[in-house]
Image (tube, rainbow, N blue to C red):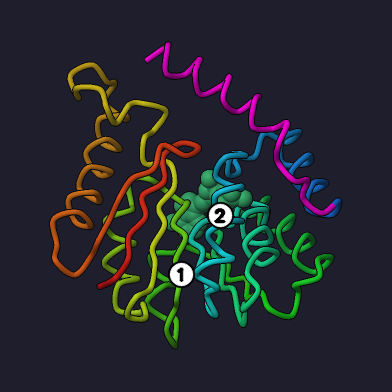
Amino acid sequence: MRAWEEMDERFERFMQKYESPLPEWLQKIERQAEEDEVPIIRRSTQRYLAFLLGIIRPGRILEIGSAVGFSALLMANFDPSLEELVTIENYEPRIVQAKENFSNSPFSDKITFLTGDASKLISTLEGRFDLVFIDAAKGQYPEYLKLVRPLMTSGGVILADNILQDGFLLMPKEALCRRNRTIHKRVREYLDMVCRDDQYITDVLPVGDGLAMTRIL
Ligand SMILES: C[S@@+](CC[C@H](N)C(=O)[O-])C[C@H]1O[C@@H](n2cnc3c(N)ncnc32)[C@H](O)[C@@H]1O
């Protein structure tokens, strides 16, 4: 596991020499999040999303887990066809920060920010989504999938972040503490749901903390 982490860090340092800088206003949000220790998508996930969004060009995006709005704004910035991005957050201190970041951004008219528990809010959403980005409570991923599936367009894409759980997913469950065992179980359950069902095609990329990409067939 250690060799893998070292390789990952070396690869990240190497790639940072080649990456195109984000717009200054987005870099500022990233810096602030790092300073405040808010967990946001890692650099390799940022690069991958920037690339993918330009290809799939989703009209409507749903994000579960906004934190301070960084990934929502990054997706908005790299989606040339964006009509609306709905994003959900339930933690008050981050809600305040996200509201400010959204309203100061060039995408304030395209972002719908919903505050509260995603498990309750998703079922109140109307219309269809072309892309769903799941990045909230890892133990809830199977539930989020059940809730978002009826809202997806045919051919729509679901991305689930932190699938590898810093490598814990690959370890035998006996080697984990009780809390990690529960998350381990739920993340595997999520993978079973998206990998063993004919309505989906799925792969997991070792990008960032592991990104499961699922397309609705
Ligand atoms: C990893 S952070 C999201 C980071 C963000 N996507 C980014 O990269 O900029 C996960 C967020 O999900 C939120 N969250 C966790 N459970 C939630 C729930 N049930 N409903 C809404 N938000 C939730 C947490 O408060 C946290 O801010």
Measured as percent of width and height from the top left, residue 187 is found at 28, 43
Above or below residue 26? Residue 163 is: above
* Between 107 and 59, the one nearer to me in the picture: 59
Q: Circle 1 is placed at which residue position? A: 131
Q: Tally the numbered discs.
A: 2
Q: Magenta region's main secondary structure?
A: helix
Query: Which range is magenta?
Result: 1-23
Name the mark on residue 49: 2
| Residue positioned 42% across, 83% down in the render | 128
User: Marks 1 and 2: in contact by CB < 8 Å?
Assistant: no
* Between 156 and 124, the one nearer to me in the picture: 156
Instruction: Give the amino acid type for the residue marked by disc 2 in the picture.
Output: Leu
Quarter holding residue 132: bottom left
For mark 1, give the secondary structure.
Answer: strand
Name the mark on residue 67: none
Magenta stretch: includes residue 17: yes
Q: Residues within 10 Å of mark 2 (few under 14, many from 20)?
A: some
Quarter holding residue 69: bottom right
Image quadrant in which the N terminus is located = top left
Measured as percent of width and height from the top left, residue 203 is found at 30, 50
